Amino acid sequence: LAAVAQGAGPLITQPFVQRTLDPEQWGRVSFSISLVSVALIVILVGLPLIITRAYFDGPDGPRKAASLSAFGILQSAGLGLLGVGAAVALAAAAGRLADDLSTVIALAVVGLLGGIQMCISVLRAQHRALAFVGITIGAQTLGHLAGLAAVLLVSRTAAAYMGAFAVVVALTSAASLVASRPGRPFAFPGLVGSALRTSAPMLPHSVALVLMLQGESFILTALHGPAFYGRYGAMLPMALGPLAVARFAPLRPPTASSNPPPGPAPAAPPRGAPRPPA
């Protein structure tokens, strides 16, 4: 259910946002969302899985998970702020801060979503399905719906979309902190270092997988600009949609053409009749 909720936001809002924004602004929105997906994998460093596993590590497991969750929240916030600062500096130096504002906001969203992922890893271990699904919906589906409302009612710009998205994610982040109650980040000596040594080898594979799925957004935006990527992003679902449907189409079995047509069954040979040669 949480996975469906995660993908439902873009699926519901994308057709309306594409028709509301011009190709350049839609391209900036699409690029910002891709940036969030890729950067989030980087700052997580595989820690959510380690947190969930630590929860079941003996009598102190829940406290260990809470401690690792707190460290992950601080790490995500710190790396998010670092990314925002670097993006602001680069955009200001190029005189493009207003144009790249959606990208700056996207990096702030990454830091918030990283903290949310740390919190829901604890909720997953605690089998708190309702809280887990509710926070996931708040961080994804409601964020995209808020972005759609912003471009319809406030301003038809990528910055308005990502700004509204960031506000909802910030509120969801606060709710996730209340629900999971992180502990002290360094309550167990050596725990953080051990967790990072375990999770870090998963990072290159995860980043490569996400880039394989969404790397074209960076290439096309760099080579042709956001307007071109906006048109590409608008046509992509139309190209991939039939392929996704075809995956679920029933396939004809290889022996179907050799089956006899339906009809009455042949009569059984009389008792005692000689059997035909093989």
Image (cartoon, rainbow, N blue to C red):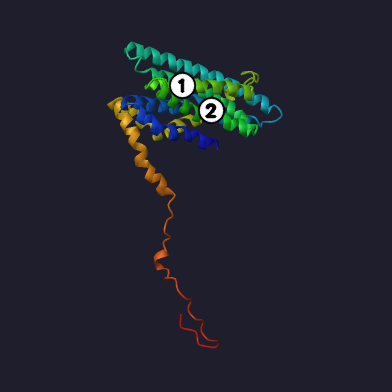
Q: Name, please, the residue furthest toward the front.
A: 153
Q: Quadrant of the N terminus?
A: top right
In the foreground, 81 or 142: 142
Q: Which residue is outermost to the right?
A: 59
Foreground pick, 125 / 4: 4
Q: Which one is nearer the viewer's eye here, 144 or 110?
A: 144
Q: Position of residue 205 (x, y in %)?
A: 46, 33
From the image, tell me which residue sits under label 2.
138
SS label for mark 1: helix
Q: Residue at x 39, y 16 (%)?
A: 87
Q: Is residue 113 visible?
A: yes
Q: Residue at x 41, y 28 (%)?
A: 34
Instruction: Residue type at mark 1: give it.
Output: Ala
The image quadrant of residue 147 is: top left
Q: Is residue 50 above or below residue 257?
A: above
List the residue tagged with mark 1: 164
Q: Please report the residue visible at 50 percent of the width from the left and 28 percent of the height from the top.
A: 142
Return the x and y of residue 78 as percentages of the image width and height.
51, 16
- Which three-letter amino acid code belongs to the residue tagged 2? Gly
Residue 215 in the image: state x and y as whole percent: 37, 31
